Amino acid sequence: MKRLALLLPLFALAAAPARAEDPAANAAPPSFGAVVKIEVRSAAPDFVQPWKTKSTRTSSGTGVVIGPGRILTCAHVVADATFLRVRRHDTDAFFHGEIEFVDDDCDLALVRVADAAFMEGIEPAALGETPAEQSEVLAVGYPMGGDGISYTRGIVSRVEDHRYSHGWTTLLAVQVDAAINPGNSGGPVFDMRTWRVAGVAFQGNKEGESLNYIVPAEIVRHFLDDVADGRRDGFWQENFSWLPMESEAERRFWRMGEGRTGVRIVEAGDYDGEGPFRTNDVLLAVDGLPVSNKGQVRLPGNEPRSLAYPFYMHQVGDEVPVLLLRDGEEVRETARVFRSLPRHRRYVYNDAADWLVFGGMVFTTVSWNWQSESKLRYWNDRVALNRTRPAPDEEIVAVSTVLPDLAMEGYFDWERKFVHTADGVEVRNLRHLAEILDAAPGPFVELGLMGTKDFDERIVLDVAEMRAATPRVLERYRISSDRSLRPAPGGAAATPGRSRRGGPPPPTTNH
């Protein structure tokens, strides 16, 4: 549940994958002294009334020491943390920790403990590899907030892409039947053959029995490699659309030829005009791996993975070779790995909400936190929340709430609406709206709004009346300022620690 920052190399985590012939196989189990309890006090912002902070809550999770003073855990364990401390299971002493790096996409975080006494007698755990199906694993942690360390044994049931409920992203996950409960999150799951960390416990599915999930070692390694340079770039997210080619007639129509397999690109997305894909290209292979007609690739050991896998396992900035069929001819291209930015803010953790007060109208930047807390179930399709930004600084602004005041009579119900224009100018972001309203010559300013209906709504405000109302509204509702000071979108300072979520709550729950 909060953010981190790694400064030292994580050599202990770079252990080679352990296969059957690996000398680490069948090694003796460790002492588990590297498994620690993380106690957190957190306070999230109120996104509907964004000048407020919610009440402090107490929670706990698990972490595993992977280097001197460095602890791997889950992002949701430290999300919105205001105070954090760490306990070892062999002593009653506690140590204060600081968040170094967080990546909400993969629900992982790094916590640092500066006190040298913390490491006395602890041997950091080594990172292994993603376990194969039917492997025996041992989950170690502090479920349900207990102070005693807990061990639960299980079998790997499945390895495939799965929705991560914290970041609302889809990445590789490992399903296990070991009992994993709230408090286990962030704790290591050991491969019982090698006793290396095979993954990190992070969520379960409440709609089934013994459906628990771990972030696999290869996703952990991607995260650690990413932040080794002192910054988080995150994971590639699927930014083009494709359809399967399981119909023989369709394959013939697109001149695929006997024995060829692949999927058809129906929307080039962020790559359009800049990257390798064109509409109606057939994607035959990614990173040297043939693509099946249903959109899968096979690793050298014949393990199936999704079409997205070869992209998101590369670091942002890498180039991935792709083989395409275009107008019946094979074309070799490279696809650059980058993160696409949605027009709405990603699900926000470890960051304040923002606001602008004009008269009694409170504007804010749209995020999935705001959507959830405002109980807005339906979006206007024209807002295009799932499309990427035409420009880096473009974000969607909404009227979050209307605070009762004489200047707002007749407008009390004009909340939870998206701001499209102000004085005829298309609004790029909250800071841009503030600039327009500050410079409005009057006597009136017109706002173009969009609700859940697919048509524009207009509202006219008296500029002088709204400016006169603002100070008394601030005083009456105990708001410190008429605007927040969050950095403008698109800059590096505005993006660390954010993640994305969208749509209805998933059946999975964080542990």
Image (cartoon, rainbow, N blue to C red):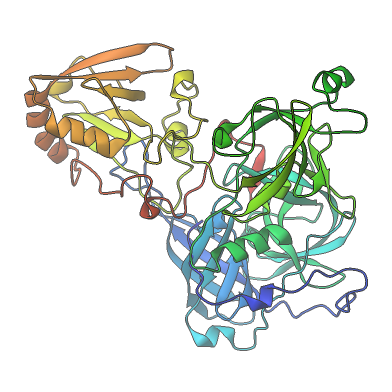
Say whether residue 442 is left or right of residue 80: left
Image label count: 0
Q: Nearer the viewer, residue 184 or 421?
A: 421
Q: Nearer the viewer, residue 402 or 327?
A: 327
Say whether residue 285 is left or right of residue 341: right
Looking at the image, residue 66 lies above or below residue 423: below
Looking at the image, residue 216 lies above or below residue 329: below
Say whether residue 464 is left or right of residue 70: left
Looking at the image, residue 142 lies above or below residue 114: above
Could one spot residue 413 in this view of the protein? no
Dividing the picture into quadrants, the one containing residue 207 is top right
Q: Residue furthest front?
A: 329
Residue 372 spot, x, y in % from top left: 47, 33
Dividing the picture into quadrants, the one containing residue 361 is top left
Could one spot residue 142 in this view of the protein? yes
Residue 240 spot, x, y in % from top left: 62, 34
Residue 246 spot, x, y in % from top left: 85, 25
Dividing the picture into quadrants, the one containing residue 459 is top left
Residue 222 spot, x, y in % from top left: 65, 60
Q: Nearer the viewer, residue 40 or 416?
A: 416
